Image (spheres, grey):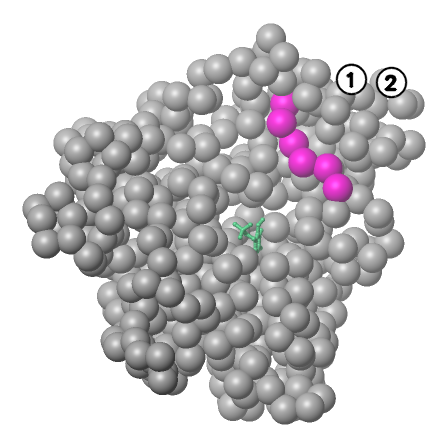
Amino acid sequence: MSALTAGAPGRTAFDVTALRAEFPILATTSRGKPLVYLDSAATAQKPRVVIDAVGDFYRHDNANIHRGVYQLSERATLAWESARACVATSVGGAVDEVVFVRGTTEAINLVAHSFLRPRLLPGGTVLVTEMEHHANIVPWQLAGAATVAIPVTDTGELDLVAAERMLRDRPVLLAISHISNALGTINPVEELCAMAHAHGVPVLVDGAQAAPHLVIDVAAIGCDFYCFSGHKVFGPTGIGVLWAKREHLDVMPPYQGGGDMIDEVTFAGTTYAAAPRKFEAGTPHIAGAVGLAAALTWLAAQDRVAIQAHEDALRDDATGRLAAIPGLRLVGTAPRKAAVLAFTLDGAHPHDVASLLDGEGVCVRAGHHCTQPLHRRLGLPATVRASFALYNTHDEVAALARALVKVRRLFG
Ligand code: PLP
């Protein structure tokens, strides 16, 4: 079965047990207990089709791309460019609007270098939000912009009245997350794009947390830039996507120089290849792109409506069970949110909670989740975060709740 056709053959209704069987790591143990993996917001586990696609590429098709005239290199080039076409289809964009990068972080750094910096005048700002990941704050600052943040309410939603007011100050760019990695809030990106464009402000949407949960349509969102990481969408690490409107890519200067991104090089100067190749200097992560295409194809073959319902049910189940634990406070209770639950437990440091849960085989994240400004705004040094994906089960929600009750007793 080829990576691009492999999916969930014969499965019509959503069957979490069958789906889990496609993820070898989920059958393993941790600390002698069945693995309960609740850290998919950090990185998602990989289905066998992705693991096999990467292995098969190295076993059968490995060569460098765009350079060789021999058949193997042509096959590798075809695999790389087919992966680009697969990404374009999955986000609803054009093939030459898809730039392969290492991940969301590199995508945002690319836009900061090649789009923001040439437009930045003294005092220029980038409008972000208080809930942004550091990857959507620091690159703008490195490029020389001041970052100004749309406030977050106590429930973890964006203050849209403030957003509208702040857009009137004409920031150079609005840069917002589609889904918050720390709170799970699903932001109204369509509305924010329309608002920003009414003020002539282009928009970058950080889709790192949205790509695994939502069907992405860049045209419907109306953004100028959309980015995500392969490893969070069940693909390999070290590969990611920047989608950008062609009109922007055409005028943006290259981000890095090297092989494969040029038209002609002389000692007097260089002319560059057309986008997207002018942004892909050097030998890229070819196997990573092949694995990413396998992941996106696999995801597209699933029943996305049923998966959405499953993830919503996990979120509601986990919210109910955790809220019932005395001393546990949920952080981020927006009405539109993904299955990401951040919380604190009275008298217990989040790192201690996460370590004790690890003893029960339950993997969660503790800390500021690369959102220090958000945690400062909430007056919390750290939280515990349990993040769910399509392969999690209600039994795992129960295991988390049971383990937390145990931890509670230790600190209670
Ligand atoms: N943006 C968000 C919302 C994230 O959750 C993350 C990672 O957790 C990133 C950006 C950075 O992604 P990466 O480390 O894959 O580049």
Provide the major secondary structure of the magenta segment: strand
194 or 50: which is nearer to us? 50
Residue at left offset 71%, top offset 22%: 357
Residue 66 horizontal/vertical position (percent)? 20, 58
Examine the rendering and report whether any part of residue 167 can be seen: no
Residue 406 horizontal/vertical position (percent)? 78, 17
Residue at left offset 75%, top offset 64%: 153
Asked if residue 366 is among those painted magenta in the image, a careful observer would answer yes
Number of the label disc, if any, that sits on residue 406: 1
Check contact, mark 2 vs mark 1: CB within 8 A: yes
**Vertical relation: 206 (above or below) 75:** below
**Vertical relation: 22 (above or below) 283:** above
Asked if residue 246 is among those painted magenta in the image, a careful observer would answer no
Mark 2 — residue? 410
320 or 7: which is nearer to us? 7
| Mark 1: amino acid | Lys
Residue 22 horizontal/vertical position (percent)? 34, 25
290 or 327: which is nearer to us? 290
The stretch of residues the image draws in magenta is 362-367
**Vertical relation: 385 (above or below) 278:** above
| Mark 2: amino acid | Leu
Q: Label 1: state its secondary structure.
A: helix
**Vertical relation: 62 (above or below) 337:** above
